[in-house]
Image (spheres, rainbow, N blue to C red):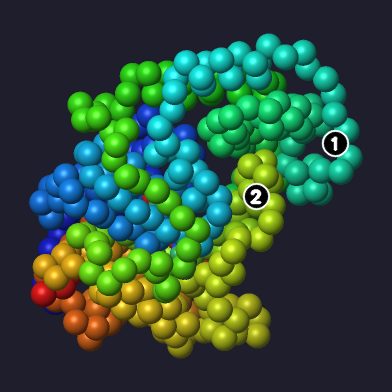
Amino acid sequence: MKYVDRPELGEHATFVPNKKLPVYNWFYYKEGFSRDIVFHLIERFQIGKGNTVLDPFAGSGTTLLACKEKGIDSIGFDASELAVFASNVKIGNYDLENLREEAKFIFTRKFFRLDTSNAPSIAKRAFSKFALEDIQFFRGNIAEIENKNFFLLGLVNAAMKVSYVWKDGGVIKFKKHPAPPLRHLYRRIIKNMIKSLEKKMPETSIDTKNISSRAFVGDARMLKLENESIDAIITSPPYLNNIDYTKVYAIEEWIAGLEDRPAIRSWIGHTKSDITADGRPMTSVGTAYFEDIKKALEEMFRVLKKGGKAAIIVGNAYVNGEIINSDEVLAKQAEKIGFTTKEIDVVNKRFALEERTKKKGILRESMIILEKN
Ligand SMILES: C[S@@+](CC[C@H](N)C(=O)[O-])C[C@H]1O[C@@H](n2cnc3c(N)ncnc32)[C@H](O)[C@@H]1O
């Protein structure tokens, strides 16, 4: 396997640069990567107009939005209904005049208090009584307009900023603190969201309205796509040892009205079979995880056209005293399926830590470049 150090891409394998980018920052997705890694790959793979890019683990839609900005068709799937909701709001086409009218309706309507006693207990812990009343009030207003999801995503964003929630790995924790009134913050956020559309996206000299981009709730292990229908794949699966996404986003889901369970219940990651009795992951090198990854790779191979390229960003893991080189395992799995591994770009390196301080080796975060010959 050919490993190439590319530390210049390291930051872009994280969501951090997206936080400053209009539209990309409409929804904070800790697990996401950034626009520029997609731009880099579009150029490197020479993807252009008329091609279709797939992201089978689309998350908050970074691949789809970046492709849209470049005038390239794309399609994404994600098991999380919230992620798909956020992606589709971000890649949507809007009539600005209509949005302004709806904003006026939402923010000039006289405030009235709604009963918050039937809010789920997690929401009651997450918000002050006033914030909860505002959420209920605005959700009622949003129910009466056309661009519901646009305004709901803004509400999710604003509400999380005034919430008592902080996320510690895979766990939601609560800490009360003084917070500004949600109403004002929400108005400002919506104003900025509309403004970022007015300015159009920075890269956009292209008419993006006719570009096909869409995210669907779906399972990367069973893609609803024809054989050999995709030109390139840009994606990042969940990392081994990663968090249970469903739990951490429960509050956002409630605000967006997605409290129903997602259609797909199996998540790539640990399953019961590789968790020990005391709840820790087993050293069985994440058997269930790699079985799932294999299925996802087989699907990628099936839907990719001959000559098509795939970039898969993945991080290695430290599990029960053992370093697991997911990048290497994944590349080997891909080769068995029929892919050629062109290169493994190492974009980040960090220490594997035990008890938070003891260094046990190096963990890579890599971008695996594959080709279907
Ligand atoms: C590392 S994140 C991808 C983030 C994305 N690149 C972005 O910029 O937002 C992995 C995603 O895989 C999704 N996922 C987990 N299991 C899945 C499955 N079986 N099929 C499709 N998506 C799945 C998770 O919900 C999560 O959004």
Is residue 147 rendered to the left or right of residue 71? Answer: right
Q: Residue at x 66, y 60 (%)?
A: 261
Q: Residue at x 24, y 83 (%)?
A: 337
Height in image: 63 above or below 68?
Answer: below
Is residue 201 rendered to the left or right of residue 140? Answer: left
Is residue 296 rendered to the left or right of residue 164? Answer: left
Residues 165 and 371: in front is 371
Residues 5 and 339: in front is 339
Q: Quadrant of the C terminus?
A: bottom left
Height in image: 11 above or below 293?
Answer: above
Is residue 201 rendered to the left or right of residue 99? Answer: left
Q: Position of residue 212 (x, y in %)?
A: 32, 45
Counting other residues with Cα less than 10 Å from the Cα at mark 1, is it few (<14), some (14-19), or many (20 or more)? some
The residue beneath circle 1 is 116
Q: Position of residue 134 (x, y in %)?
A: 74, 27
Is residue 347 visible from the viewing direction of this image?
yes
- Helix or strand or loop: what does disc 2 sit on? loop
Residues 110 and 369: in front is 110
Q: Residue at x 69, y 52 (%)?
A: 259
Q: Is mark 1 within 8 Å of ligand 1?
A: no
The residue beneath circle 2 is 258
Label annotation for residue 183: none
Which callout, 2 or 1, points at the residue further toward the start of the chain?
A: 1
Q: Residue at x 22, y 39 (%)?
A: 71
Indicate the amino acid at tag 1.
Thr
| Ligand 1, image quadrant it occupies | bottom left
Indicate the amino acid at tag 2.
Leu
Tell me where residue 34 sits by quadrant: top left
